[in-house]
Amino acid sequence: MSHPILKNLSLPVVAAPMFRVSGPELVVASCKSGVIGSFPAKNPRTIEELELWLSQITSELEKEPSAAPYAVNLIARSDRLEEEIELCKRYKVPMVISSVGSPEKVVGPIHSYGGIVIADVATLKHARKAAELGVDGLVLLTAGAGGNAGWNNPFAFVRAVREFYDGLVVLAGCVMDGAGIRAAEVLGADLVFMGTRFIPTIESIADEEYKQKLIEVNMDDVMTTKSISGMTANYLRPTIVDAGLDPDNLPPYQEFNNSEHRKKRWKDIWSAGQGVTAVKEIVSVEELVKELSVEYNEKVKI
Ligand SMILES: Cc1cc2nc3c(=O)[nH]c(=O)nc-3n(C[C@H](O)[C@H](O)[C@H](O)COP(=O)(O)O)c2cc1C
């Protein structure tokens, strides 16, 4: 599909929004490298800080007319959603990623200034519902992704959605290198979300120890559980052990959420997708995108 948002991209990639990981530097560096940079609106603690981030990002990107567009991730259940939408309107945020809940409240206001909305979905039912609400694209959350993940296999999910949907399709989950980006396109996706690969970049705001940990672990260390966030999510097993919990006997979500351990979620209990095996060193966003481009353009033969 040739959507205008795909112009100016060096690769069909979104540096995916990540809680406690994506900040303005990561967004700007991603856009300058030619991939869509993004961040969750809940990363800045206050609405005033969100405005500062938007102002910093827009003024940096104005200096680079060839930069890729950026995106803000709005959580449908956010208690400050109205204010976040107002700021997106004021700054004419080019793309909004709606997640955890219906994109219903977001579509109209973002379309009113020409922005586009893509919505996270993990099932065919939700994909159809979001499409009916008039979103411009669907982010298909699949098994093995970092953060709150899906459970469907990407081969089946992309093909099933393509049977009825001709908008933007974005594949999220375990796209770990240039081959994965190509494979997603072959399946019928227009773009991919890459989260895990962007955590250990110089520009990300993740803890240095978290970045280092990603180099040490591999996909066997990634485990799926609903106990920690209440949703299907992937975490690094060794960090669950370090937090004083038994990964094989985690308490049910309610119990976890009512305990002291709650504070360790995302802060000490770190998340990564199965694609973590591709992480070998901490690099700049520019270096990462260059490496992905070489793999995508030169090494992959189809
Ligand atoms: C640490 C971490 C935090 C995340 N936080 C968010 C978030 O706040 N909002 C969101 O929509 N997705 C979030 N995600 C999911 C990513 O946007 C993306 O879908 C996922 O990382 C893609 O899979 P990959 O990590 O295998 O590339 C998070 C992922 C990680 C690893």
Image (cartoon, helix red, strand yellow):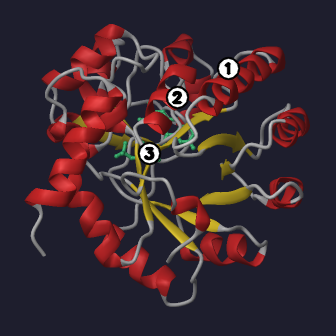
Does residue 216 appear in this view?
Answer: yes
Kindly identify the amino acid type of the residue bearing the numbered disc 1: Gln
Ligand 1 closer than 8 Å to label 2 CB: no
Circle 2 is placed at which residue position?
Answer: 28
Between the C-alphas of marks 2 and 1, the distance is 9 Å
Circle 3 is placed at which residue position?
Answer: 35
- Residue placed most toward the observer, 23 or 214: 23
Name which of mark 2 and mark 3 comes first in the sequence. 2
In the image, is 152 to the left or to the right of 49? left
**Residue, far bottom:** 163
Circle 1 is placed at which residue position?
Answer: 56
Give the tally of numbered discs: 3
- Residue placed most toward the observer, 165 or 181: 181
Name which of mark 2 and mark 1 comes first in the sequence. 2
Q: Are marks 3 and 1 in contact (CB under 8 Å)?
A: no
Please rate how many residues cluster around mark 1, counting C-alpha atoms within 10 Å: few if below 14, some from 14 to 19, many from 20: some
